[in-house]
């Protein structure tokens, strides 16, 4: 199975539905894109916005100037505009110029194209330099254009503007960029030329047409050099078509509506490899700077198609066709000029990937849904609990199984006791089992009269609190296994949590109450009342606050010493999980209303609302508080930046994700999924 590329950053616009285009700055530091009524320039590795300009319509094309100073955009209304890439200040507008924009490689000229005309402007002033002759037939329109690498020539691809298209109405004309004189004209092509690319050595032009055909033409004469793909019997007007040369001019990659990306020898037309995509269309293709890899943009939208785990764009080996990594569904994908990153664009989002870095460290396999995950303190081990009647310990690096703890029913919860190197697993059989995390040797079995769905070690590992469907929470000596006391609720105890100093224990129950107890004596300090089952409780790191999550569609924050309610945080669905950031400044919630939300604990104000496409089942902060991980019924684990609310990582699973946690060093994330796997993923890198 192909791994997902590591996500470096994510640029988003809420509610945006268009497929954005992306354009890299020549130094690979910045990305220009259209998102949510704005053209934005953002730093690729951090997602930090450099500037933005508000526009009234969606740009059809977007291009960074090769000198990195300007960004040009072309619009369907026929207007083009150029603005300063550093400040967003508008430089000039070009009226009735065209929707396609293309900079000459020396940044001296800007070409624009509409269906009727191609114009060339002075890039410094915006003054019109020349207009190129329109196609000779009134039925023929301009489809695409591209500058030669030396900026001396401009190639224009044309084709039919009607359906059904007349036969042999399409071709390539090459013009002198100084005089506008036509230098060469190809023979009529079998279909409209919708994509073309110059070879870096300036000798050849590769084309792909609406009928699926592809060819290499002599740039000086327009003569056919090589037929790469013959015409298709079925012409699909407006079908996607993409073509690109390798940096050494020896290979051509094509992509189109047949779901195939193919790499050919440019001279002979011999096909080196092909890569089948899950969806029908391939929107763009691009070679890496060294020519080793090809990036493609594709999605999965075929009506009635089954979900494909490996749908979307890919990066593959240009020699063998072997997939290196996945980019997810996207409509555009481009390597950075230095070849180190890939930018992909999909509705409302542009993601920056590092294709050389493995996103998934290991995959830990069970025979049933994984209900809980827990890291050892050093991040080298992961404990899991599963419906396959086992809790297990895995090597986080290799995925090798180290310990298996057998139960007589599904295991619902697990916790790692790092100080004493043990794990505790609680299951539907009503037994909590303690075993050595290194050897698997059984230490103790602790009994309830109902399923055990929650447990927690004290910070020093000497005490273990458990909660059960028998309506009790119990506190045990984790060394001897002796029960210290029993705390009784009028319903299942769904959650337990210790304060960091180990002096207090909180419980939450299906009876609609949460309790705060003295962890040494069992005396109740406070009872906190909800109007629905309490699904989660958590203390802030300093122990001053207690947060609760409830089926009554609220999360609440209490003074942990007095039990006084400080804030009530509303959702539109049951709240399933709640967690504090390490410094206590932030509180995150997960809800059945398909959102996770981040709140300010000083004021109770909602800071961010983070959307999933299904119930959000789990949330976890990294210890430095920079990232928030979520797991959802939509089959994704996601990571958001807490400073901005921007999504910085999304990893698709094959089932609902019900557990997420960070390693203490913040390098890794473990997820538990209904597909029977736990996964160890690389966390976003610190910037």
Image (spheres, grey):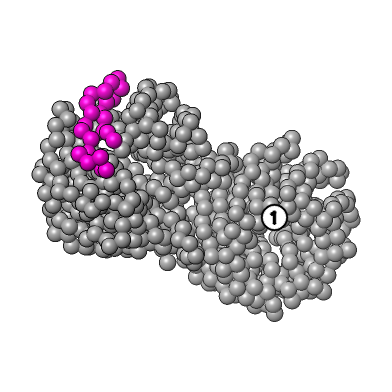
* Span colored in magenta: 116-140
Mark 1: few/some/many CA within 10 Å (<14, 14-19, 20+): many
Above or below for 670 versus 50: below
The residue shown at (58%, 38%) is 643
Disc 1 secondary structure class: loop
> For residue 558, what is the image quadrant?
top right
Report x, y in % for residue 196: 25, 46
Kindly identify the residue that appears in the image at 73 percent across and 73 percent down: 428
Answer above or below: position of 145 versus 108.
Answer: below
**Front residue of this view, candidates 432 and 550:** 550
Count numbered badges in the picture: 1
Would residue 260 be found to the left or right of residue 639 on screen?
left
Does residue 137 belong to the magenta stretch? yes
Percent of width and height locating residue 477: 78, 65
Whether residue 280 is in magenta: the answer is: no
Q: Is residue 558 left or right of residue 186?
A: right
- Residue at image position (41%, 60%) is 279
For the N terminus, the quadrant is bottom left
Q: Is residue 300 left or right of residue 634?
A: left
Q: Which residue is mark 1?
A: 592
Percent across and percent down for residue 186 are: 15, 46
Q: Quadrant of residue 181?
A: top left
Question: Residue shown at 23%/24% (left/top)?
Answer: 129
Residue 468 showing in the rendered view: yes
């Amino acid at each position: 199975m192909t791994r997902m590329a590591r996500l470096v950053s994510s640029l988003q616009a809420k509610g945006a539905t268009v497929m954005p285009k992306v354009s890299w700055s020549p130094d690979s530091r910045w990305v220009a894109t259209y998102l949510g009524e704005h053209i934005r320039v953002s730093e690729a590795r951090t997602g930090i916005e450099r500037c933005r300009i508000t526009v009234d319509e969606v740009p059809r094309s977007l291009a960074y100037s090769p000198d990195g100073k300007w960004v040009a955009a072309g619009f369907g209304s026929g207007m083009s505009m150029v603005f300063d890439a550093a400040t967003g200040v508008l430089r000039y507008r070009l009226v009735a110029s065209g929707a396609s924009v293309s900079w000459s490689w020396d940044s001296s000229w800007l070409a624009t194209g509409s269906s009727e005309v191609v114009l060339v402007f002075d890039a410094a002033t915006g003054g019109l330099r020349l207009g190129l002759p329109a196609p000779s037939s009134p039925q023929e329109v301009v489809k695409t254009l591209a500058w030669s690498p030396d900026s001396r020539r401009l190639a224009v691809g044309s084709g039919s503007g009607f359906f059904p298209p007349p036969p042999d109405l399409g071709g390539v004309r090459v013009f002198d960029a100084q005089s506008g004189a036509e230098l060469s004209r190809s023979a009529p092509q079998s279909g409209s030329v919708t994509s073309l690319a110059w070879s870096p050595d300036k000798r050849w032009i590769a084309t792909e047409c609406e009928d699926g055909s592809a060819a290499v033409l002599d740039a000086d004469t327009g003569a056919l050099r090589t037929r790469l793909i013959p015409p298709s019997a079925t012409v699909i007007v407006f079908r996607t078509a993409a073509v690109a040369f390798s940096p050494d001019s020896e290979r051509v990659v094509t992509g189109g509506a047949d779901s195939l990306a193919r790499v050919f020898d440019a001279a002979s037309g011999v096909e080196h490899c092909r890569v089948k995509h899950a969806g029908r269309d391939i929107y763009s293709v691009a070679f890496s700077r060294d020519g080793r890899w090809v990036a493609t943009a594709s999605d999965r939208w075929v009506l009635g198609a089954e979900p494909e785990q490996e749908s979307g764009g890919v990066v593959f080996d240009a020699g063998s066709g072997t997939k290196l990594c996945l980019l997810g569904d996207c409509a555009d994908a481009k390597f950075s000029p230095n070849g180190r990153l890939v930018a992909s664009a999909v509705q409302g989002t542009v993601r920056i990937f590092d294709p050389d870095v493995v996103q998934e460290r290991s995959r830990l396999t069970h025979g049933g849904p994984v209900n809980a995950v827990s890291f050892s303190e050093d991040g080298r081990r992961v404990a899991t609990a599963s419906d396959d009647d086992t809790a297990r310990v895995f090597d986080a690096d290799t995925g090798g199984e180290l310990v298996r703890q057998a139960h007589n029913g599904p295991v619902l919860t697990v916790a790692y006791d790092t100080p004493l190197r043990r794990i505790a697993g609680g299951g539907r059989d009503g037994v909590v089992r303690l075993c050595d995390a290194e050897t698997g040797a059984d230490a103790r079995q602790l009994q309830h009269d109902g399923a055990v769905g929650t447990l927690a070690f004290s910070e020093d590992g000497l005490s273990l609190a458990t909660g059960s469907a028998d309506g009790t929470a119990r506190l045990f000596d984790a060394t001897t296994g002796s029960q210290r006391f029993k705390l009784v609720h009028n319903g299942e105890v769904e959650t337990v949590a210790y304060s960091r100093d180990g002096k207090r224990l909180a419980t939450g129950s299906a009876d609609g109450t949460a309790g705060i107890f003295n962890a040494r004596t069992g005396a109740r300090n406070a009872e906190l009342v909800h109007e629905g089952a309490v699904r989660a409780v958590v203390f802030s790191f300093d122990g001053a606050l207690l947060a609760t999550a409830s089926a009554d569609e609220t999360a609440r924050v209490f003074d942990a010493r007095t039990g006084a309610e400080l804030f009530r945080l509303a959702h539109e669905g049951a709240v399933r999980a709640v967690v504090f950031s390490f410094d206590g400044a932030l509180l995150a919630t997960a809800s059945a209303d398909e959102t996770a939300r981040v709140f300010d604990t000083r004021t109770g104000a909602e800071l961010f609302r983070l959307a999933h496409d299904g119930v959000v089942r789990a949330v976890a902060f990294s210890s430095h508080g920079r990232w928030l991980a979520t797991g959802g019924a939509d089959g994704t684990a996601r990571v958001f930046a807490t400073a901005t609310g921007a999504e910085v990582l999304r990893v698709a699973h094959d089932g609902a994700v019900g557990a997420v946690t960070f390693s203490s060093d913040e390098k890794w994330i473990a997820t538990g999924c209904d597909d029977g796997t736990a996964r160890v993923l690389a966390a976003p890198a610190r910037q």
